[in-house]
Image (cartoon, rainbow, N blue to C red):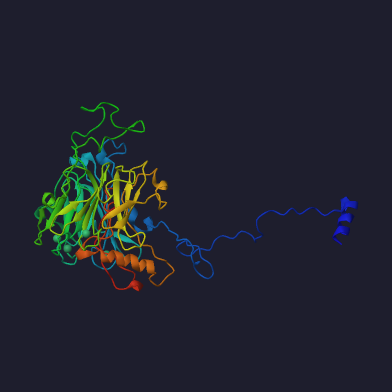
Amino acid sequence: MLLLSSALAQQNPAEKEPVQRQQSGMSTGGAHAPVKDALSRPITAGGFVEGAPVIFVDITHAAGLDKFHHRSGTREKRTILETPGSGVALLDYDNDGWLDIYLLNGSTFPALKGKEAPPRAMLLRNNHDGTFTDVTAKAGVANERWGMGVAVGDFDNDGWPDIYVSNFGKNRLYHNNHDGTFTDVAETAGVTLGGWSTGATWGDYDHDGYLDLFVPGYAKFDPDNPPIAGKGDLPAGFCQFRGVDVMCGPRGLPGEGDHLFHNNGDGTFTDVSVKAGVADAKGYYGFSSVFVDVDDDGWVDLAVANDSVPKYLYRNKHDGTFEDISYLSGFALNDDGREQAAMGIAVGDYNRDGKVDFYITNFSDDYNTLYRNEGDAAFADVSFRAGIATLTIPFLGWGCCCAIWMDRNSRRCPRQRAVAWQSLYRREVRRSVICSTTAISMSFSIASIRRPRYCGTRSRIRTTGLP
Ligand SMILES: [Ca+2]
Ligand SMILES: [Ca+2]
Ligand SMILES: [Ca+2]
Ligand SMILES: [Ca+2]
């Protein structure tokens, strides 16, 4: 039959039907626009698709967060002081169970001299409806100094989170007055310092029940005589990046030391940096720090991310002092034995083995580093093996923080989530810091995290650190 049809077609080519060329692919109906819900999330008639990607919607304006504008010197960025950003903290300052936002601001050289109004930090209260209200003026936390980092902790154990602000210039310790206002008690507490402080961290290193405070220092910088190529002793072209004149530093600048303040329990602190062995005698350029127990002995240890030089890791010796295990642990350098320009620190148990790991952001043309905890305070740079190194090479990283992801469709606590929380809580030794990063540019801090209702009772995490 087929053969016959074919023969007839050949005999009468004029009667041949037009050839229907079939395209590759598949046959479908017409185009249909996606159906979205009120939050612009694509949905089907049956609701969300199991396993579908999580959709993020930019709600900055709707939430009222675009009122904040960060300033840091001028666009030209002729000096290193103008190049970093400032920290941010997520904290429940009014203990209503909803996270509020504290955004630090930078400053300008004219503002430092009182020639123009200084940029202000902003505290945004969570209205429980997706919006925030600027409560900075009432709270009294505008800072109005050149802000770098912020760390949140309840230093006086009154149940209300207090705020430490690291500045270029004097630092602040905002005590929470329980009524929506704060009082800067840094002077009486003895924790103002001066100079250039960066990402601080709270942790009870001596197990006396009171949070102690570590404050890294970056570099010594004189705003009246800033290092600029072509000025003073510095020849033109002295400070370049890829052949372009840029700001000078940090290399070549004297480093600022680090400080550990012991909480005396009476509202005052004592600088014990030298005795404790964490004073940074080398003058490294500290950016971020975090108290965290890396060896599971129940005592917080201390990690410090330094810019352009080796990083510090100090092991708590349980007697008020620390042992410098930066090199011994493998944390000081990367897998090639090379120092990196570390900016931010994130702490988290990424491989769910119960041991805390570190993720470090670095300068551009270098990869961000994932340090896997091998046990007994030994760390291995597994960035490339983990497949997350190459894509970070072109970018300059700043603050970072671990995140615990949750299956949005699940009303249960997935095992991995439970393990992650347990892992973090186990390390919350006597109000010590757990999951935090403190970085200069986006110093990030979570003071009170409310666990989802379906995952158990409310718990608090004291963390510090950043963006
Ligand atoms: Ca709140
Ligand atoms: Ca307090
Ligand atoms: Ca203490
Ligand atoms: Ca420890």
Name which quarter of the figure residue 319 lies in: bottom left
Instruction: Locate residue 364, reporting x and y percent.
Output: 36, 42
Q: Residue furthest right?
A: 11
The residue lying toward the viewer, choosing from 403 and 44, is 403
Instruction: Locate residue 196, reporting x and y percent.
Output: 19, 44
Image quadrant of ligand 4 equals bottom left
Quadrant (top left, top right, bottom left, bottom right) of the N terminus? bottom right
- Left or right of residue 98, residue 214 in this image: left
Q: Is residue 53 above or below residue 342?
A: below
Instruction: Locate residue 136, reporting x and y percent.
Output: 23, 56
- Left or right of residue 458, residue 24 in this image: right
Answer yes or no: is residue 25 visible: yes
Answer yes or no: is residue 70 visible: no
The residue lying toward the viewer, choosing from 5 and 337, is 337
Tell me what residue is drawn at x 32 percent, y 73 percent.
Answer: 456
The residue lying toward the viewer, choosing from 115 and 46, is 46
Q: Report the number of discs.
A: 0
Instruction: Locate residue 212, reporting x and y percent.
Output: 16, 58
The residue lying toward the viewer, choosing from 86 and 293, is 293
